[in-house]
């Protein structure tokens, strides 16, 4: 017995050693081959059906990473064995992945993964909620309202048509009698009916129409919409991964309408295909309610045959087929008709900086209805809509220019021009561009201190606080550390400077503090060609960065290396890097180091006060409506003089 136990222990030891293999490198140092270690990116760009995540692979575990990506599920701890994952190749470092086909208003769990020869390692689990669905709406001539959804470059009704009239107002013959149905088909006359001749089913399943209703010149679909062509259906199938899987992604989930097993139904794009079945031509009999969804195409194959599409309850295929024109009744989904809608093209981005760009559109036709809104919309993940970032650039046709602001450096953006009339919103072609990383310039003061500079909008700013000890003329600025003496300099309207908290060690980080008498001195505080920004200069900067509620966060240095928590809204995507040097009161006391960044403007208000601007740790806001006594000590940022300004545009002209 003792020998047997010993044998078992030896086996366990060998298994343990196999799970943690050691190898010797050329230097004789032992290293261990394990699973990769990595972290998962916080999900971003979250919509109703998509989101962006990714990961950072910190170590390959001693064996090359051969596959990496993210996996997600609707339960905790997703793995690569779940249905949902991306594949982003091999290697270490950072990668980004996009999740698509997510259900709206749903909690999703996601983890980054990386696989090497020893197996698969996972990053930390992140969780997020998808947004509510954002459906459009469409109304037919009967005032039936349908939900619509933009799918790639197409816009579809996501309910079956149930109109009783053509778009010109003429009635579509309603035929319940089987013999009449057959007679109309043979005669080539348009007709419709309710599924199983039950009008109570119209709300759920819509109506069934014969080919001659679909192909009637009076138009079955609402104005600006059409019965989809075979090519329209094919483009939708391709977008969803091909015919073999598109059916599952189009079907309504569950078995409320579909007969079990409703194989592979995920309804990824909320198309919600329903199994209304069909009505045949020979006897006018109804078939396959609950088993199949059939949809007309508008294409005739020849004089006798037309195209259609169908989806089965026991398959994920989205199949195309031919049927006799003098045949059955099928469901209809309408697609927005771009050929009769607004004609618009997107202008390629130009004048691209790290936080802004210009684009625009060209509208050559209003589609028969006046254009009431136009502009450019953008996002960082594709097919932007007016629900994303957008400009508003007036009305009417013709050419227009759009200014895209609030962009992130080193980021790829997707843009589309848009225009809206009474029939809805139409988009131009999708284009993309990538913002560059910021390019810093430099400027030196009379003391030889060098400062980084950056272009924000159409002005160039110092992105460090001024720390000069002399005016441009070479004369020294009095350095006042004594509290009483600081107050005396104010009462005598004399210029003064000091170190933050009287600590010389802070100068390299926070610069110096100056009273307004130094700011306003004719001997000039800023280097040649530069000036103290006016209140209007600061407000223009604020407006460029999105307005009062956002600009402070975009100007503040991110994190809490210098700022006290929580440093709300700090992104520093302007690269201005505002630091919380606090201030010195006119009585010589210091305050708010770590809590606020205070900057002088060049504007006097009413003697003895002047204007300032500031940001604080608790807000993303930019505060600019305040005045204080001239004896306060604040930080100074210099701005390049307008006469010395740089043109931000990388090109002055562009082609439409």
Image: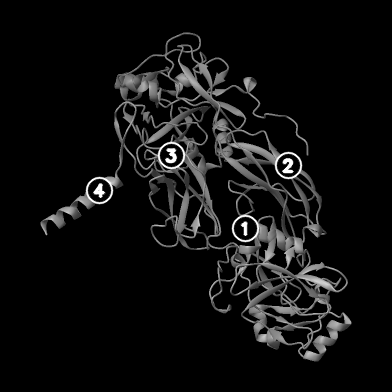
In the image, 109: left or right of 327? left
Is residue 242 positioned above or below 650 on the image? Answer: below
Q: Is residue 458 above or below residue 197?
A: above
Q: CA distance from mark 1 to mark 2?
A: 30 Å
The residues bearing labels 3 and 2 have C-alpha atoms spaced at a distance of 44 Å
Instruction: Decide which of tag 2 and tag 4 comes sooner along the chain.
Output: 4
Residue 14 shows which numbered tag? Answer: 4
Q: Residues within 10 Å of mark 1 (few under 14, many from 20)?
A: few
Which residue is at the front of the view, 42 or 88? 88
Give the number of the disc on residue 347: 2
**Of helix, strand and loop, which one carries label 4?**
helix
Marks 2/4: CA distance?
66 Å
* Secondary structure beneath label 3: loop
572 or 253: nearer the eye?
253
Estimate the spatial distance between the alpha carbons at disc 3 and disc 1, rounded to whole Å: 30 Å
**Which residue does the image show at 37% across and 21% down from the upper left?**
507
**Sequence-wise, which precedes: disc 3 or disc 1?**
3
**Residue 169 at what x, y percent from top left?**
82, 76
Can you tell which of label 3 and label 2 is closer to the viewer? 3
Query: Mark 3 = which residue?
Result: 64
């Amino acid at each position: 017995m003792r020998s047997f136990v010993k044998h078992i222990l030896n086996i366990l030891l060998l298994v343990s050693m196999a799970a943690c293999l050691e190898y010797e490198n050329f230097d004789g140092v032992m290293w261990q081959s394990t699973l990769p270690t990595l972290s998962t990116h916080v999900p971003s760009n979250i919509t109703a059906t998509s989101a962006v995540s990714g990961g950072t692979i910190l170590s390959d575990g001693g064996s090359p990473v051969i596959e990496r990506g993210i996996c997600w599920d609707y339960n905790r701890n997703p793995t690569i064995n779940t249905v949902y994952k991306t594949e982003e190749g091999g290697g270490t470092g950072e990668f980004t992945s996009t999740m698509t086909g997510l259900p709206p208003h749903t909690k999703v769990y996601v983890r980054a993964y990386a696989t090497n020869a020893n197996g698969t390692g996972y990053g930390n689990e992140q969780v997020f909620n998808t947004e509510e669905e954002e459906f459009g709406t469409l109304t037919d001539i009967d005032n039936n309202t349908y939900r619509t959804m933009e799918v790639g470059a197409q816009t579809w009704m996501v309910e079956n048509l149930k109109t009783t009239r053509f778009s010109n107002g003429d009635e579509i013959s309603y035929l319940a009698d089987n013999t009449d149905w057959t007679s109309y088909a043979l005669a080539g006359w348009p007709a419709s009916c309710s599924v199983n001749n039950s009008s109570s089913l119209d709300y759920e399943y819509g109506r069934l129409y014969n080919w001659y209703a679909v192909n009637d010149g009076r138009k079955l679909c609402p104005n600006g919409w059409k019965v989809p062509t075979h090519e329209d259906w094919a483009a939708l199938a391709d977008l969803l991964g091909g015919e073999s899987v598109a059916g599952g992604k189009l079907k309504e989930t569950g078995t409320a309408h579909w007969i079990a097993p409703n194989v592979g139904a995920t309804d990824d794009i909320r198309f919600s295909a329903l199994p209304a079945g069909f009505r045949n031509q020979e006897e006018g009999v109804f078939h396959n309610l609950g088993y199949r969804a059939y949809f007309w195409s508008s294409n005739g194959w020849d004089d006798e045959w037309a195209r259609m599409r169908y989806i089965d309850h026991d398959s994920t295929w989205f199949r195309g087929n031919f049927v006799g024109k003098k045949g059955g009744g099928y469901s209809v989904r309408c697609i927005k008709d771009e050929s009769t809608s607004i004609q618009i093209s997107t202008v390629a981005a130009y004048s691209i900086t790290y936080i802004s760009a210009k684009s625009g559109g060209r509208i050559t036709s209003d589609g028969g209805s006046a254009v009431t809104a136009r502009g450019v919309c953008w996002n960082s993940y594709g097919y932007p809509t007016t629900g994303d970032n957008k400009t508003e650039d007036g009305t009417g046709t013709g050419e227009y220019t759009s200014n895209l602001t609030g962009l992130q450096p080193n980021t790829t953006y997707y843009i589309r021009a848009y225009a809206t009339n009474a029939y809805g919103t139409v988009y131009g072609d999708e284009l993309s561009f990538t913002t560059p990383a910021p390019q810093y310039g430099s400027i030196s003061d009379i003391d030889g201190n060098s400062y980084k500079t950056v272009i924000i909008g159409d002005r160039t700013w110092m992105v460090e606080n001024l720390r000069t000890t002399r005016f441009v003329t070479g004369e020294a600025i009095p350095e006042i550390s004594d509290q009483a003496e600081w107050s005396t300099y104010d009462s005598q309207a004399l210029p003064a400077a000091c170190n933050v908290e009287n600590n010389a060690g802070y100068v390299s980080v926070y610069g110096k503090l100056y009273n307004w008498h130094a700011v306003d001195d004719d001997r000039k505080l800023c280097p040649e060609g530069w000036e103290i920004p006016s209140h209007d200069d600061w407000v223009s900067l604020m407006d460029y960065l999105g307005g009062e509620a956002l600009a402070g966060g975009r100007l503040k240095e991110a994190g809490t290396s210098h700022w006290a928590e929580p440093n709300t809204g700090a992104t520093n995507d302007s690269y201005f890097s505002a630091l919380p040097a606090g201030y010195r009161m006119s009585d010589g006391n210091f305050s708010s180091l770590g809590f606020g960044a205070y900057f002088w403007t060049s504007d006097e208000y009413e003697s003895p006060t002047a204007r300032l601007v500031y940001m604080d740790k608790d807000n993303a806001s930019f505060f600019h409506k305040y005045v204080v006594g001239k004896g306060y000590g604040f930080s100074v940022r210099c701005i390049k003089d307008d006469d010395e300004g740089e043109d931000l545009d990388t090109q002055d002209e562009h082609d439409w």
